[in-house]
Image: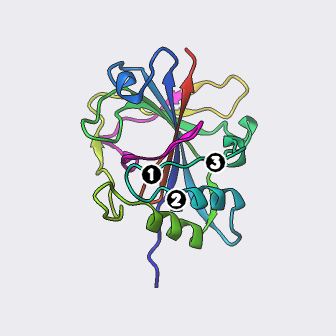
Amino acid sequence: MDKSINAGLHVVHIKEEYGTLEEAELDREGIAVLAFFFEESVEDNPHIDTVLHALRRVRFHGNTSSVANFKMSYLIPPAHELTAYYRYTGSVTTPGCNEAVIWTIFQRTLPASHRQLVEVASEVWYWTGKPMHEIFRPLQPLNGRIVYKSLPSSSHMMLPLMPSSHVTALPAAAQPILHSSLTLLSLCSVLVTTVNHRG
């Protein structure tokens, strides 16, 4: 029997003044990540299959591919459905884990079938040729940070959560495996997309 797979999508924005993620990592507010968890669905998500097809062409380090006419709106719900979320300042998930990220974790999940989640995990390999399995970061200390929760109102205010000793970090990202107008990075069944952020 297949074990359950925890998977998510990261939409990684960098400030427009920076040309690379590495440059943005030097700014404590250089990166903004929008994060979603996948929820297993009975039906396949056809847009995930589009990404899977591209992943098969870039399994090995150095391979590149393109996804023509693909929009993030194919995967991400419209803004009016994304009013419930958590936000905190944190770090990138690759070594050296620079504290340069404003994380936004949405409560709304994204659908993907069990087959699709398993295939994502099997198609993503390290540059060493080994598959990316069971790679994640453990719980991280808050170190004085505050985790905020959005309020369900038209004011879009945010409320600090009660203090606790830990915050759950999202799984780590890996080496770039797909280059296009969007750069897709993946670890286990984590999909990460890099686009520019104005401001």
Quadrant location, the C terminus: top right
Question: Which residue is labeled 1 in the image?
Answer: 63
Question: Which residue is labeled 2 in the image?
Answer: 57
* Farthest-out residue, bottom: 1
Q: Using the image as rendered, state which of residue 163 and residue 194 is in the foreground.
A: 194
* Quarter of the figure with residue 164: top left
Mark identifier at residue 103: none
Name the element at disc 1: loop
| Between discs 1 and 2, the one toward the N terminus | 2
179 drawn magenta: yes
In this view, 141 is above or below 109 = above
* Quarter of the figure with residue 77: top right
Pointer 3: residues within 10 angstroms few (<14), some, or many (20+)? some
Q: Main secondary structure of the magenta part?
A: loop
Is residue 146 among the parts visible in the rendering?
A: no
In this view, 34 is above or below 185 = above
Residue type pointed to by label 3: Val
What whole-number distance in Å separates the C-alpha atoms at marks 1 and 2? 7 Å
Q: Using the image as rendered, state which of residue 159 and residue 22 is in the foreground.
A: 22
In this view, 186 is above or below 123 = above
Which residues lie in the magenta part? Answer: 159-184
Residue type pointed to by label 2: Arg
Question: Which residue is labeled 3 in the image?
Answer: 67
Residue 184 pos. (x, y %): 51, 45
Q: Using the image as rendered, state which of residue 161 and residue 139 is in the foreground.
A: 139
Residue 86 pos. (x, y %): 52, 37
Drawn side of residue 113 relative to residue 24, left or right: right
